[in-house]
Amino acid sequence: AKADGRSRIRLFSFELEEKLVARKALENDLREALQRSEMEIHYQPLLNTASKRIEGYEALLRWKRGSFGYVSPAEFIPVAEEIGVIDTLGEWVLREACRDAAAWPSDITVAVNLSPVQFRAGNLVRNTLRALSDTGLSARRLELEITESVLLEATEKTLATLHQLKQLGLRIALDDFGTGYSSLSYLSSFPFDKIKIDKTFIQDLSSRSDALAVVELVVDLGKKLGIRTTAEGVETEAQMIRLQEIGCSQVQGFLFAKPQPAACLDFNVIGRLAA
Ligand code: C2E
Ligand code: CA
Ligand code: CA
Ligand code: CA
């Protein structure tokens, strides 16, 4: 029994060590990823629910990690935040997305995700301004998506940063609404332009009445506050019909298109297919 215990311990520490080595390798590769040109941005359309026309695209980061293939942002963004490369990465995404969008039809917007870490860094407003002026993209075509976690530390500095960003002329969306520590006070403490309802609610829309109630509530609240609402993760026609009935402003999901490289975007095709 003693020998068993020892070998279990040895086995355990061996596995742990393997994990640590793998994690270190991931960190090192992530630090080099930009220089190696392994990062790409894919774009997923945001459609007007009523007209089914494309209003804009969300920029979603993709990492092609050498022989490992694609690594999910859900996996590497937290690591990038931890090891302090999210600032460089986030700045790159912002600039690339603005550059790509500048070549699109002038009524099409681009939405860029921001990490809470980018907020604390203090150079966000300057970097955003520079990305806009360097690429020539009009600020009104840029939307920044922030999550509730930014507002958890809703200090005066956070609010000041948000207001400064809005003063540039861009729009701010509250992402993943309903997942974190959602508080209605967030909606009154800052003038958001859009609420993105998390896909977990959308996916349960036709099967769970509580999910339907939440989506209806958020959409109604948005209407009353003059805030647009976007449903993310729309995968079925049934969900789409419900969202049209409820009067959600915008839809996004695999039903219409998966995220794809800028070179593959067709600004007309999807609208026509969906119509
Ligand atoms: P998110 O901002 O909530 O982005 C939406 C996610 O839902 C994307 O996952 C998108 O591919 C996925 N999605 C879209 N439609 C559907 C659908 O119909 N069904 C399902 N099941 N999923 C759908 P993705 O691209 O893997 O990104 C995951 C998360 O990584 C994002 O969630 C965002 O939080 C983060 N992320 C991605 N790009 C960036 C970035 O440039 N900067 C930062 N800070 N975070 C990013
Ligand atoms: Ca987002
Ligand atoms: Ca989201
Ligand atoms: Ca999400």
Image: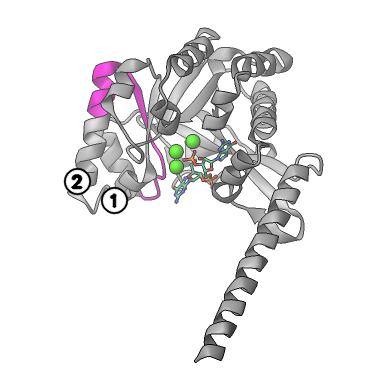
| 243 is within the stretch colored magenta | no
Q: Toward the viewer: 101 or 37?
A: 37
Judged from this view, the residue extending furthest toward the right is: 36
State the mark number for residue 204.
1
- 219 on left or right of 173: left
Q: Toward the viewer: 96 or 44?
A: 96
* Tag 2 near tag 1, CB within 8 Å: yes
The picture quadrant where one finds residue 62 is top right
State the mark number for residue 66.
none
Identify the residue position indicated by label 2 in the image: 210
Nearer-N-terminus badge (2/1): 1
- 33 on left or right of 122: right
The picture quadrant where one finds residue 263 is top right
Q: Position of residue 105 (x, y in %)?
A: 61, 22
- The magenta segment: 219-236
Q: Position of residue 220 (x, y in %)?
A: 23, 26
Q: Distance between the residues labelled 2 and 1?
A: 9 Å
